[in-house]
Image (spheres, rainbow, N blue to C red):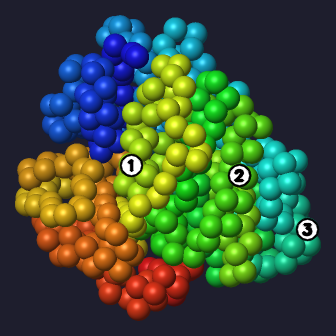
């Protein structure tokens, strides 16, 4: 096991990793920007090093600053969390060259999975269903029109070099395709420094379901079941649950086997997630693989009892998986709400500022992953998520009621949050019945 780990991230995921390290008896080194000087995670780390000013490009995305901090702190490994440099193959290579273990997939696996076009090609070779669309990155709007006419509208334009809803646009006709193609390229280039995009058929009335996998350095791979991430706004996830309300035993087995096959072919190691769309007839289509821990990993932890962050660290340290596929069971239902400092009534405009009052809910089956507190000032430089509210109860009906109760107890004053929207969602008949698709928010809330 490692002696000391540097966490190349901030906020709730930095705090989450620190807690896992403490339980493993591993020292932690937190890095922070000047804007995060008063963050809670710094108080719980063993050491803290400032790596630059507030803008991420000058701090959390600056490889040289992070590696310098790691060398000064004499760490064994770096955990990148999610976002920032977590899927950056070059960062993993730099860590490797400095004899610092990167807690994530090896660089070659990151490259195989990180470019979505390459990942789709690998899935096709493995006979994993994929959505009809472009075979490679689309070079211009003329080619995009040819593909759209071949597969039929509506189509999705997606960034080849990343996810999270950035560089993603929908088009219903030629005019909107040309406009959105250019916009998607620009957004992808700004977000991922890779403006390449591809086009695929839009699957209507689809659910977004992902499969969590763990792979060690000894060839052992397991899947931990699915997370249903269908409730989204502008392709950004809002609510996740496990298991999916529409999952069957045979569908979970098929999707799990597909995820394992993909990970094995990509020579993947550590925690990763294969993402799929599932249509009304329970046909599934591979979208991409996320080569990192996911924001929504807690719902998998709650239903399996497996600490994914600890497993990431153990795998990176060279340990074998301590369980086989047959050992994994799923108990109860877990639901997660992402609590963002945003105004849902104003286009989800970010709401940075000082939190004047913060009261977190509690009670049976309630978990909070958050780095904020009363008096904390939310910086304007980063993602607007300030926490995750997770509940775990024996049945879905009980989980929904527990979430409604917990949301009603959650008090965050001084900034706008998504809590009121979440409360409205959990009161909606279609959500309660589990009869939703990826257009739910736009269809019923006009957001």
Image coordinates of residue 328 in percent, x first then y, are 51, 49
Residue 61 visible (yes or no): no
Q: Which mark is residue 146?
A: 3
Which of these two is toward me, 203 or 274? 274
- Residue 72, placed above or below residue 444: above
Q: Quadrant of the C terminus?
A: bottom left
Q: Which residue is mark 1?
A: 305
Give the alpha-carbon distance from disc 1 to disc 3, as whole Å: 48 Å
Find numbered disc 3 in the image and state the secondary structure of the residue it sits on.
helix
Query: In the picture provided, is 403 more to the left or to the right than 110?
Result: left
Q: Which residue is mark 2?
A: 257
Find numbered disc 1 in the image and state the secondary structure of the residue it sits on.
loop
Residue 194 image-quadrant placement: top right
Q: State the residue at coordinates (27%, 51%).
A: 369
- Residue 178, placed above or below residue 378: below
Neighbour class for label 3 at 10 Å: few (<14), some, many (≥20)? few
Give the alpha-carbon distance from disc 1 to disc 2, as whole Å: 21 Å
Which of these two is toward me, 179 or 83? 83
Among the two numbered marks 1 and 2 on one chain, the one whose residue lies closer to the N terminus: 2
Which of these two is toward me, 131 or 310? 310
Query: In the picture provided, is 58 more to the left or to the right than 250?
Result: left
Find numbered disc 2 in the image and state the secondary structure of the residue it sits on.
helix
Give the alpha-carbon distance from disc 3 to disc 2, as whole Å: 34 Å
Q: Residue furthest front?
A: 326
- Residue 152, placed above or below residue 361: below
Image coordinates of residue 84 in percent, x first then y, are 47, 38
């Amino acid at each position: 096991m490692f002696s000391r780990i540097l966490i190349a991230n901030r906020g709730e995921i930095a705090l989450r990793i620190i807690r896992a390290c403490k339980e493993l008896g591993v020292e932690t080194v937190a890095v922070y920007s000047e804007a995060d000087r008063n963050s809670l995670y710094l108080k719980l780390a063993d050491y803290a090093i400032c790596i630059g000013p507030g803008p991420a490009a000058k701090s959390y995305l600056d490889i040289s600053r992070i590696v310098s901090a790691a060398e000064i702190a004499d760490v064994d490994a770096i955990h990148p969390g999610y976002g920032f440099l977590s899927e950056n193959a070059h960062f993993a290579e730099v860590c490797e060259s400095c004899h610092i273990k990167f807690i994530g997939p090896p660089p070659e696996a990151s490259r195989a999975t990180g470019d979505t076009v390459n990942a789709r090609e690998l899935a096709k070779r493995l006979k994993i269903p994929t959505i009809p669309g472009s075979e490679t990155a689309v070079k211009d709007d003329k080619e995009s029109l040819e593909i759209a006419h071949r597969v039929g509208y509506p189509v999705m334009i997606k960034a080849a070099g990343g996810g999270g809803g950035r560089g993603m646009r929908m088009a219903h006709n030629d005019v909107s395709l040309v406009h959105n193609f250019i916009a998607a390229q620009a957004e992808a280039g700004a977000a991922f420094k890779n403006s390449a995009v591809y086009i695929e058929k839009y699957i209507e009335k689809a659910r977004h379901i992902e499969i969590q996998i763990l792979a060690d350095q000894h060839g052992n791979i397991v899947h931990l079941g699915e997370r249903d991430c269908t409730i989204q706004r502008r392709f950004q996830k809002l609510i996740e649950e496990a298991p999916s309300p529409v999952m069957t035993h045979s569908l979970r087995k098929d999707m799990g086997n597909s995820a394992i096959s993909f990970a094995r072919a990509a020579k993947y190691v550590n925690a990763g997630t294969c993402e799929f769309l599932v249509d009304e007839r329970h046909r599934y289509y591979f979208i991409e693989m996320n080569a990192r821990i996911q924001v929504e990993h807690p719902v998998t932890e709650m239903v399996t009892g497996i600490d994914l962050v600890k497993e990431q660290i153990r795998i990176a340290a060279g340990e074998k998986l301590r369980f086989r596929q047959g050992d994994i069971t799923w108990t109860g239902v877990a639901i997660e709400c992402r609590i963002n400092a945003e105004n849902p009534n104003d286009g989800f405009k970010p709401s940075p500022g000082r939190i004047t009052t913060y009261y977190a809910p509690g009670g049976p089956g309630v978990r909070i992953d958050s780095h904020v507190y009363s008096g904390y000032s939310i910086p304007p430089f980063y993602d607007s998520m300030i926490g995750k509210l997770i509940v775990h109860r024996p049945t879905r009906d009980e989980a929904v009621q527990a979430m409604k109760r917990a949301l009603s107890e959650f008090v965050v004053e001084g900034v706008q949050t998504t809590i009121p929207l979440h409360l409205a969602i959990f009161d909606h008949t279609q959500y309660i019945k589990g009869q939703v698709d990826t257009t739910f928010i736009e269809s019923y809330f006009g957001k």
